[in-house]
Amino acid sequence: MRFAEPNFLWCLFTLPLFALLFYYAYRRRKKLAARFVSLSMLPKLSTSVSPWRRLAKVTLLLLALAFLFVALARPQWGRKMEHVERRGLDLVLLQDISLSMLAEDVKPNRLVRSRHEISAFLENLTGDRVGLVAFSGEAQVMVPLTLDYGTVQMMLRELNPGWLMPGTNLEQAIRTRIPAVRGSTP
């Protein structure tokens, strides 16, 4: 086990000081009570006050402080850092969002069917980075290369005709794909 912030463990040395303060407060309270009543009569007059309960409270409070200091030190175990080489493909998906995608020659329409096919494709991927480029009359990188397939699917659901300039310019989409793979902007 290791601690991310081990300096907080030094605070544990303050616990005996707190214990002494509680003991001092207990003694002081007893002396003040002795001014008014003899010590032999005090237990009979204060039946609701139990010294064992007070001791239990103080003990629990000191334990809580100890656990707080240990928690602030952020204990960590069970994991170690190791370098892992990942092998996978860099894929850029092109999604047409021109008005022609609303044609219903495929049920329910081309756009919904395309979204469904891309989502099914993404569900079968593991370890490959995926980017998304939307195009109609112009092309735009919607999601740069990422391992977060949920983000790609979320953006895919949000794409609708009319977001970009009207038309269908596949060449522009292919040219936009190249900087997306390299990680730069077009």
Image (cartoon, rainbow, N blue to C red):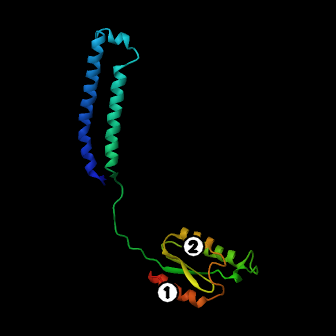
**Residue for point 33% across, 31% down:** 59
Q: Amino acid at mark 1?
A: Ile
Does 48 appear above or below 108?
above
Residue lying at the far bottom in this picture: please name it: 171
Residue at point 41%, 17% (across, down): 48
Name the image quarter holding residue 133: bottom right
Nearest to the observer: residue 1 or residue 141:
141
Q: Residues within 10 Å of mark 1 (few under 14, many from 20)?
A: some
Q: Where residue 122 appears, x then y in whole percent? A: 57, 73
Q: Whole-percent x and y of residue 177?
A: 52, 85
Q: Is residue 54 left or right of residue 134?
A: left
From the viewer's perspective, is 179 left or right of 19? right
Q: Which residue does the image show at 74% across and 81% down from the upper left?
A: 103
Residue 16: assigned label: none
Q: Quadrant of residue 155?
A: bottom right
- Residue 77's spot in the image, x, y percent? 34, 53
Mark 1 and mark 2 residues within 8 Å of each other at the beta carbon: no
Residue type at mark 2 is Leu
How far apart are the alpha carbons under marks 1 and 2?
A: 20 Å
Query: For this rendering, which residue is in front, 63 or 125?
Result: 63
- Residue under the image location 48 percent in, 79 percent down: 89
* Front label number (1 vs 2): 1
Q: Secondary structure at mark 2?
A: helix
Residue at numbered disc 1? 178
Say few, some or many: other residues with alpha carbon within 10 Å of mark 2 (under 14 / 14 to 19 / 20 or more). some
SS type, badge 1: helix
Q: Is residue 127 above or below residue 38?
A: below
| Upstream in sequence: badge 1 or badge 2 | 2
Residue indicated by mark 2: 122
From what the image shows, is residue 82 above or below residue 133?
Answer: above
Q: Position of residue 127 (x, y in %)?
A: 48, 72
